[in-house]
Image (cartoon, rainbow, N blue to C red):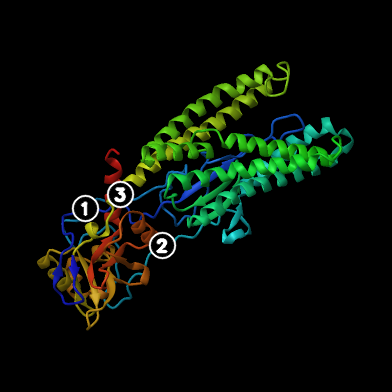
Amino acid sequence: MDVSGGSGQPRSGNDEPAEPRTDPTAPGPGSAQDQDRAPDTGPPAPGDSGTPAHGDSGTTPARDENDTTPAHDHSVTPTPTHPAGPSGHDTHPDRAAAHSHPGPGQAPPPPPPRPRELRGGLLMGRPFGVPVYVAPSWFLVAALITWVFGGQLDRVLPQLGAARYLVSLFFAVAFYGSVLVHELAHTVAALRFKLPVRRIQLQFLGGVSEIEKEAETPGREFVLAFVGPLLSLVLGGVFYLALQPVERGTVLGVLLAALMISNLIVAAFNLLPGLPLDGGRMLRAVVWKITGRAMSGTVAAAWVGRLLAVSVLIGLPLLSQTGALGATAEDNVGMGTVTDALLAAIVAAIIWTGAGNSLRMARLREHLPELRARALTRRAVPVETATSLAEALRRANDAGARALVVVDAHGEPLSLVRESAIAGVPEHRRPWVSASSLAQDLTEGMRVCAELAGEDLLDVLRTTPATEYLVVEETGEIYGVLSAADVERAFVKAMARPS
C-alpha cells in the first residue's frame, strides 16, 4: 500500500494475500565469473604437456558471503536465491516469522547484522582497481607443481640435485603469473565495456575473474571471452622468442620452454568450443548473433560443453594409453593409468557442471525482468511515533494494508515497522507498545524506487540487506513497503516457470 507524502491516504499498492515467509534474506544481482583453470596439476617438462588453466571452468569460486546473487553466463556457480511470489502476502497484516520483540519502554531490536565479507584469500594487489586474491588452495597446487616438475627436472637436469625444487617452485609462481595475465585481459576488457569486476582470485585449478554484469551484445561477449586465450597465445610467443638465444640444456632454457608450452596449452584448452570455457562463450556469442537470442547461444554452447566433458572423460585416458601424449604405452600402466583417469574425471566434472550451471543462470536472467518493485510492493499506512501498535494495526486492517511506516509530524518517513518485531508482541500488550519502538530506522539504501525491476532491483537489495524497504515514487512520495520475503517468493515462482 502506498501513502502519499504522509497524507495518510492509501494509494495503489499490492494488497493481495500472502504466503508465510520462508527466508529473511534478499536476493542480489547477477555476477558473472570468468574462470580460467588448469585441468592438470603437473607442469610440463621439455617435450611434455603442461598444465593448462582454462577459462570458465566449472569449479566454484569463493564469493562474498553477503552476496546472494545469481551469476551470469560467465559464471558456473549457482547461487542461492530467495523465493518470493509477486503477490505473496500474509492474510494478517500483523503476521511475521520472527518471535522476539522489545517490551514497553525498551529500545527497538537492532537491525540484522551485515554478514562478514569473505575476502577470498591473501590480497596481493589491486591492478586497475580490482583486488587480486590468492586462495589458500593455491598453495596446495603450487606444492604439487613443485613436486611433479621437480621430478621431471631430475631427468632433464640431474646436476641440480635438491636445487631443482627451487627451480620448480619458481616455475609454479611464474605459471600462475601467466594465469593472472590471462585473467587481467578479461578484466581490462570488462572494464572497457563498463562491466564491474568484483575481484580476481587465483585458486586450486587456475584463476577466476568475477564480472558482475553480462555483456550487452554478442560482439562484446565474443571479445570479452577471446582476449584471455589471445593473451595466453601472446605469452607463449614471447617465451618462444626469449628461448631462441638461450642454450637448451640450461635452467633458463628449461623454464622458458616449460612456460611456453604451458601458455600454449592454456590457450588451446580455453578455445575449446563449449561452456564454461572461453571458447564456449565465443560459440555462445556467435549463436546469439545469428539467432538474436542469448538463451539460444547458451543452450547450444552448454550442450557442446557437455559433449566435450564426455570426450575428455573417455578420450584423455585413451590418448595416454596409446602414447599420443608423449610417453610410451609401457610407461602408461599402473599408477599412471589411475592418475590419468582421475585427472580426466576431474576435468570432465568441471566442464559438465559448468555447462549445466550456465544453463541455469541463463534461465534465471530470462526471468529477472518479472521482478518489479511496483508489483511486489505492499500497501502501507503512515503512523506517528506515539501511535500504539494496536491502533496502528487497526488502521492497517481498515485500509487493507499490510505494512506500517513511521512518519514525523510533516509526513516524512522515519522508519519501517518490522514484521518480525510485530509477531513477537502478544495481542494483549499491543495497546501499550508504540509502533515506532518496533521500527528500523530508514537508511538511504532502504529507499527503493518504484520503477526498479529485474537486476537493478536485486542490485539495490544486495547492496543494503534488510527485511523491508520503503518504496517511493520518482517524485519522492511514499508508494509502499517492499518485503524481502515477497521478492524471494516471486523469484522462486518465476524460476519454476519454463523458459
Q: Look at the numbered discs 1 and 3 and tell me whether their residues touch, using CB distance below 8 Å.
A: no
Q: Look at the numbered discs 3 and 2 and tell me whether their residues touch, using CB distance below 8 Å.
A: no
Amino acid beneath label 2 = Thr
Left or right, 9 with reference to 34: left
Q: Residue at x 73, y 35 (%)?
A: 148
Q: Which residue is mark 2?
A: 463
Q: Nearer the viewer, residue 323 or 230?
A: 230
Question: Is label 2 in a helix, a strand or a loop?
Answer: helix
Mark 1 or 3 closer to N-term?
1
Measuring from the top left, give residue 484's x and y in whole percent: 31, 58
Q: Residue at x 64, y 26 (%)?
A: 339
Amino acid beneath label 1 = Gly
From the image, which quarter does the N terminus lie in?
A: bottom left
Measuring from the top left, give residue 234's x and y in whole percent: 67, 43
Q: Which residue is mark 1?
A: 88
Decide: few, some or many residues near mark 3? Use Cα within 10 Å; few <14, some 14-19, many ≥20: many
Q: Nearer the viewer, residue 163 or 215?
A: 215
Compared with 4, 371 (above or below) is above
Question: Is label 3 in a helix, a strand or a loop?
Answer: helix
Mark 3 or 2 closer to N-term?
2
Mark 1 or 2 closer to N-term?
1
Measuring from the top left, give residue 280's x and y in whole percent: 49, 36
Decide: few, some or many residues near mark 1? Use Cα within 10 Å; few <14, some 14-19, many ≥20: many
Amino acid beneath label 3 = Phe
Q: Which residue is mark 3?
A: 491
